[in-house]
Image (spheres, rainbow, N blue to C red):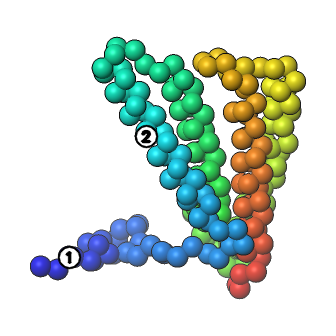
Amino acid sequence: MSQPDPGALLDNASPVPAALPVADESTRVPLAIEDWATVLIMGLLACITFANVLVRYFTDSSFAWTEEFSVFLMILLAMVAGSAAVARDRHIRIEYFAESGSMARRKWLARFGSLMVALLFLLIGGLSLRIVWDDYRFEETSPGIGVPQWWYSIWLPICSLGIALRALGLFIRRGRQAE
């Protein structure tokens, strides 16, 4: 028996398109970087959590470091996924305004949005460098396991710069698009 076409199950009134685009836009820096980083972070999170559950179940105690490290990995995962979303132009926006009007208006709004994202994350990256410097200079340690706090905080400016560069790349690609 053949499988039904998922697009055929949607009626014409459905807001969900029958076929979603499969291929990503061409970028200079491969999107596989964010994809693989997401896979690795999620796998590491799953392994850490599973190991902690097993230890807790069999010994009535837990690894002290897992919560601190898991929180760090979840924040890193959000930043990496945010970078992928910006590069794929899947970041949150109000579609009513972004997808209405002439093609020139839509192109201008897309470029304006990507430029604002780039500026925001450049600002976040610049300001977070001060946090990293303070963590390093004052020899702050993490509350759970006592490692240097800058080991965790250094990733915020790095990921912010990555997101800003992805947004600038989107700005350039949207500028090259034909109206």
**Residue at left offset 76%, top offset 38%:** 154
Closer to the chain start, of discs 2 and 1, is 1
Question: Residue 4: x and y, percent?
Answer: 21, 76
Q: Position of residue 176 (x, y in %)?
A: 76, 80
> Residue 15, image x and y in percent?
41, 66
Callout 1: helix, strand or loop?
loop
Query: Amino acid type of disc 1?
Result: Gln
Q: Secondary structure at mark 2?
A: helix
Q: Is residue 2 above or below residue 96?
A: below
Q: Nearer the viewer, residue 146 or 157?
A: 146
Visible residue check, residue 136: yes
In the image, taking residue 62 as reference, residue 67 lies left or right, namely right
The residue closer to the viewer here, 167 or 26, is 26
Residue nearest the viewer, comparing 100 with 68: 68
Split into 4 quadrants, where in the image is the C terminus? bottom right
Dot 2 surroundings within 10 Å: few (below 14), some, or many (20 or more)? few
Residue 94 rendering spot, x and y as whole percentages = 59, 57
Amino acid type, mark 2: Ala
| Quadrant including the N terminus | bottom left
Sort mark 1 into few (<14), some (14-19) or many (20+) by Cα contacts within 10 Å.
Answer: few
Choose top left, top right, bottom left or bottom right for residue 25. bottom right
- Disc 2 to disc 1, C-alpha distance: 32 Å
Vertical placement of residue 54 versus 164, above or below:
above
Residue at point 55% right, 59% down? 35
Q: Which residue is mark 2?
A: 46
Q: Residue at x 73, y 54 (%)?
A: 162
Judge from the rendering whether residue 123 lies leftward or rightward of residue 13; answer left or right. Answer: right
Circle 1 is placed at which residue position? 3
Find residue 72 and report its image quarter: top right
